[in-house]
Image: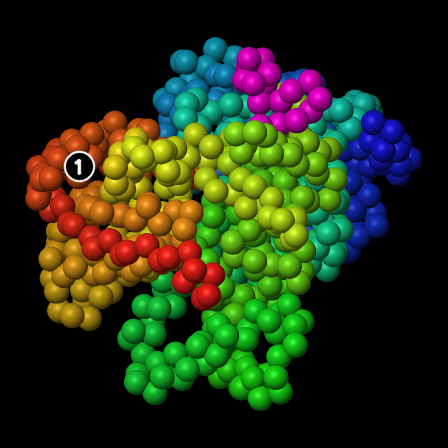
Amino acid sequence: MGGENLVQSSQAAEGLQSIPALLQRNATQYASKMAYREKEYGIWQCWTWAETGKEIEALALGFINLGIKEGDFVAVIGRNRPHFYWSMVAAQSVGAIPVPLYQDSAAEEMAYVMDHCGARFAIVEDQEQVDKLIDIQDELHQFEHMIYVDPRGLRKYDHHKLHTFTGIQEQGRAAYWEFIEDLKARREKLTYDSVCVMLYTSGTTGKPKGVVLSNRNIIEASKSSAEFDNLNKDDEVLAYLPMAWVGDFIFSIGQAYWTGFCVNCPESADTMQTDLREIGPTYYFAPPRVFETQLTNVMIRMEDAGRFKKWLFDTFMEHARKVGPSILDGKPVGAWDRFKYALGNMFVYGPLKDTLGFGNVRVGYTAGEAIGPEIFEFYRSLGINLKQLYGQTEASVFITVQPDGEVRNDTVGVPAPGVEIKIDESGEVFYRSAGTFEYYYKNEESTKKTKDPEGWVATGDAGFFEEGSGHLRIIDRAKDVGKMADGRMFAPKYVENKLKFFPNILEAVVFGNGREECTAFINIDLTAVGNWAERNNIGYASYQELAGHPQVLETIQEHVEEVNRSLADDPMLAHCQVHRFLVLHKELDADDGEMTRTRKVRRGVIAEKFEDLLNALYDGSDEVFTTTEVTYEDGRKGSISATLKIVDAEVSPVAAPGKVAAE
């Protein structure tokens, strides 16, 4: 407690006990430095920290004029734009609490969150989001006003309680002398204990929970992590991940306001890759799915390349895998190998990094779920300082991090600065830190289950510390780690990540808890497999038709059997080899409830929804007919039917312990 009080008093002395206080500092200290960029109509719009301060002040004054009170919840719904980051900081400035929502959520999902927190106000992007909230407004008894950024299509709407973003700012500027003292008083009331933001969990196993994070949580986590990676005001970050996700809040608000670096917002999801190349960020974060997709696109392009170009790529990539990570970590590498790697950098690695937008990346992170070791090593072999971190919303992201020079594909690193970790008898990981959340909103029972009186938080993940290195290894979600029928450990995520390394496999769900053997549902990657089909003149009319093609099934079978051979060398999980699988007739989708908005599979929902398919995997059937309800993009419901072929995969003999040790 003494250390915490010292930290608090040092922050108090600096007057930096809130995000709005950091904004005031940046608007003065880094006045002319770029704070935000946004691409609009193909042109980058820019705002300095001084201009950002003025934009947020005008919005905050407009909020007071509109009637936003201290303690009010303000929903924020839209893609990554400076306007929404300003909205969150303006809400904090007037003592309100921002609640960012996933913009692709269905109306009923939004209704649950907004009703749960009792949001009186919402700042949204465009007509689509306005229409969603109008559809559910009868369920939201406390909801009063909506502010929108993009006016297209909204001119004829009833504007009694619907306002333009710029209009609210104009009203704020007009009422400057009327409300400026009120705004200053509200800002000055903010302390380390004031609520900074409320973020909802993805709801993997039930209804989302509102995680209340204080200024202490956000600022301390941002400060320690920024110091750990030497982040500074000259860094550039691309903000493209959902604003409702804690990672984006820490990177695009917490660390950005602590260090003063620039946040760059792409024009749209479709232009993200182009905008990434133009910005060339020095600090980059992406979940494994993004890195998997980029690698898939690289492999597809190389399949289409000429013979010499493909030979050049394969030759130098083989060398990069051998020495690239060692060169990146500063380990000794022979002169000839260094020279050959430099040639590879000139002809292959450098151009490839520039194409991916990673030419300037000094620090890169991936988290959210485990990344396939082969994918991780591919990027590091190019000289990209990609690292893994392990975190949660409840931790303000950071639980463990990987120090430079100690980066490995099979661990999530060591405890982050200021974080304590312990493993209980069951193998579950617990932590506590200055970033530990305050409580779950309106959910005292869950708060007590998750966080004990001493501040230790249960992660729900099973793991262990390696002897010697002190690195933490996460096995799987504690609730997903089970036992096979013979009592041996069942860890589905480990197997799924190996399967997803292959560009043709987008998603995999492995079953085996309480069973004698493991089986799997697989989703193909339509981009990768579709490209293969075009190259081989194979026609198809839909995902379903391509997923059931005999050659596709044969290719997936080869991938599954390769994973089985890999698992056979792992004495701890060799028994988790996949004996039978089927390729699903539809992609797993958040709109159908099969995944969360952060694209984590809802294993229980999938097992229940596709119970007939799961039974067929275990009863010896060769094929199974099924009908499944689906949700279309416009919200309409429909159904699709298919006869799915069940494929047997060859299981590899388990390597003897002596052989593994010798290798």
Q: Which residues are magenta?
A: 440-459
Q: Looking at the image, what colour scheme do you see?
A: rainbow
Name which residue type carries label 1. Answer: Tyr
> Mark 1, residues whose alpha carbon is within 10 Å: few (<14), some, or many (≥20)?
some
Name the residue: 55% across, 13% down.
Answer: 445
Is 380 situated left or right of 86 in this image? left
User: Magenta stretch containing residue 295, yes or no?
Assistant: no
Name the residue: 41% across, 62% down.
Answer: 659
Is 517 situated left or right of 166 in this image? left
For disc 1, the marked residue is: 618
Residue 328 x, y percent position in the rendering = 62, 70
Q: Is residue 634 above or below residue 363?
A: above
Residue 534 x, y percent position in the rendering = 18, 67
Q: Is residue 282 visible?
A: no
Residue 616 x, y percent position in the rendering = 14, 36
Name the residue: 34% across, 87% down.
Answer: 308
